[in-house]
Amino acid sequence: MTPEPMSLESAAPVLGAAIGGYLLGSVPVAVLVGRAHGFDPRDVGDRNPGFWNMMEQLGWKAAVPVFAGDLLKGTAAGLLGLAAGGGRTGVLGTVDGAAVPVVYAAVGGAMAGHAWPAFAGRRGGRSILAFAGGFAVICPPAFALGTVVLAGVGLASRSFALGARAAVFSLPALQLLFAPARHVAGTGALMSLIGLRFGQAAVAARRA
């Protein structure tokens, strides 16, 4: 059966959520924290305005606001999308029904805002934490299991970075336990933006 085209009425919440998510994602948390300490993270270290670069410049404690802020941007966008989409959820709070495209649009918007922020000259980060925070709304039980993966791999390897990578890459597989494959495909589309940002960073590093 051919799906019905999206009507103007059904497209409006998706567009509104995407714009709202973009504006939330555009708040340059790392840049604001860095400037409070007398530098711009886009000019030091790996030049990525994100948690890891800030941690290397300032240490764990001073970088915690960046971690929390970037994560919460994605979560706030996801909740905005959930409200705009009617608030419908299924198994253990997993988004469902008409809320699905709206929430994904909002989280995608937040990731795009983090990557190309309107309030920071379009020079943003790689959107990993914005994705993770949004995914906490998309599929809470898979997010919870992902934190277990993060803790387990991180402790076993004594590397937060390795634990974080394992957790992020495990999320689509964990989501399959609670949501249909088409939702997981949407998650893969969001993750492709992270891959794009890493690719752009690699090209910029070669040119430099």
Image (cartoon, rainbow, N blue to C red):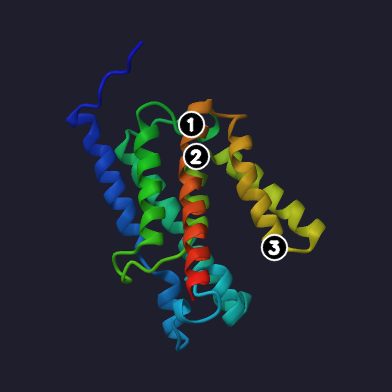
In the picture shown, does residue 126 fall above or below 106?
below
Query: Seen in the image, is 44 located left or right of residue 23?
Result: right
Q: Position of residue 192 (x, y in %)?
A: 49, 46
Residue closest to the far bottom:
38
Which corner quadrant of the image does residue 178 belong to?
A: top right
> What secondary structure is found at the residue carrying circle 3?
helix
Distance in Å between CA atoms under marks 2 and 3 = 23 Å
Give the crowd class for mark 3: few <14, some 14-19, many >=20 residues within 10 Å: some
N-terminal of the pair, mark 2 or mark 3, is 3
Q: Are marks 3 and 1 in contact (CB under 8 Å)?
A: no
> What secondary structure is found at the residue carrying circle 1?
helix
Q: Are marks 2 and 1 in contact (CB under 8 Å)?
A: yes
State the residue at coordinates (34%, 46%).
80
Distance in Å between CA atoms under marks 3 and 1 = 28 Å
In the picture shown, does residue 151 fall above or below 118?
above
User: Mark 3 — residue?
Assistant: 160
Number of numbered discs visible in the structure rendering: 3
Q: Which residue type does callout 2 highlight?
A: Thr
State the residue at coordinates (65%, 54%).
165
Q: Which residue type does callout 3 highlight?
A: Phe
Residue closest to the far front:
207
Disc assigned to residue 183: 1
Give the crowd class for mark 2: few <14, some 14-19, many >=20 residues within 10 Å: many
Residue 78 vs residue 115, the one in the foreground: 115
Q: Position of residue 96 (x, y in %)?
A: 43, 29
Give the crowd class for mark 1: few <14, some 14-19, many >=20 residues within 10 Å: many
User: Mark 2 — residue?
Assistant: 187
